[in-house]
Amino acid sequence: MNRDELLSFAWWNTGLCPPRKQVTHTSEQLDCAHEVVRQLVEVESVDLLALGEVATGQAERIQAACRSTDTRRLLVDARPDGKSQRNLAVLYNGAKLQLDGGPRALFDSQGGSRLHVGMHLLFSIHPFPAPLHVFVVHWPSRMRADSSLLRAMIGRTLQDRIDELLRSAQHPLHVLVLGDFNDEPFNDSMSGALLGSRDRNLVRKRPRHLYNPFWRLLGERQGLEEESGGRLGAGTHYYEGTVATHWHTYDQFLVSASLLAGSGWVLREAGTRIWQRAPLLSPRGRFTSRFDHFPILGMLSHVAPAETPGA
């Protein structure tokens, strides 16, 4: 399968510019971040890279660190007041993706609070034209006492927006949601409010639901016998302040039913993975620097009707 028949995407919460916190990074850490993005773009051939906790100036320097900047377009989170508390950015391949709408910031005003739901973008995929609605999210941190309630509210708002798009579409609609949800696939904001399911067949029968392939990536992905060659982390995010596990799978993506069956663009699930490599990963399965999130990758492939998965 040639590159024209593939669309690769990724998300990384860089931690370079966390909300409401002043952080000073060393030149080595910034170089590490630039190298991670360079590898994602140039080695992994990522066509759409969404970044969290990155200021506009940092995103511009990251873009410049990639040699293939001639086709890379940069978008930053749009806010009516000019503020960007969550600091989202998207670097995309202009030769593969055409921006048809956005970036548009989505908000939820429930409970008297103005909550950022995510950033909505509409792309057309080339050379096999198809609209792709992309929602990039970074939901409230668990450091807030009411964060669980807030994430559930945001999940319902996002599901309502996706449901509105699905009901108004004349043809099956391609939807991709990716980011740092600060919840696991089994938490209520994901499985209840957002209707994220582990069950592909259920999603095909109930198109309001979204398929979440990260149910398959919870916990250890190595057998005990495989650790001798170097350990991998047991999730996407590491935090020592919890009792049952230090590892959590907060970084995920979900797709609509239209990307699970039929001709055209379909999820290539073998491409769903957590990117755990140098310079982020140490031989002990920990982070090599002051980063605490691994990138995640996914892939769509363009298939003919006879190739349709599950047909």
Image: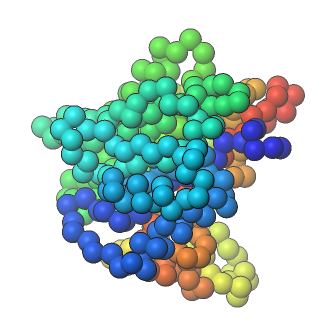
Which residue is depicted at the point 52% across and 15% down? 169
Color style of the picture: rainbow
Is residue 209 toward the left or the right of residue 243 in the image? Answer: right
Q: Is residue 201 left or right of residue 192?
A: right
Up/down of 17 relative to 186, above or below: below
Question: In the rendering, at what x and y percent does residue 129 appear?
Answer: 66, 25
Question: What is the x, y in percent for residue 104?
Answer: 35, 32
What residue is drawn where x is 44% and y is 27%?
101
Q: In the drawing, does residue 112 fall left or right of residue 233?
A: left
Q: Nearer the viewer, residue 289 or 309?
A: 289
Does 27 appear above or below 219?
A: below
Q: Residue furthest left?
A: 112
In this view, 276 is above or below 176:
below
In the figure, is residue 266 to the left or right of 27?
right
Residue at 54 percent across and 67 percent down: it is: 36
Using the image, determine if residue 305 lies above or below residue 13. Answer: above
Q: Residue furthest top?
A: 170
| The quarter of the displayed image where residue 61 is located | bottom left
Q: Nearer the viewer, residue 55 or 174?
A: 55
In-front residue for pair 16/228:
16
Q: Residue at x 58, y 44 (%)?
A: 71
* Image location of residue 237, percent across then percent down: 45, 67
Does residue 215 appear anywhere in the picture?
no
Quarter holding the N terminus? top right
In the rendered view of the protein, which quadrant contains the C terminus? top right
Q: Is residue 27 visible?
A: yes
Q: Whole-percent x and y of residue 284?
A: 57, 86
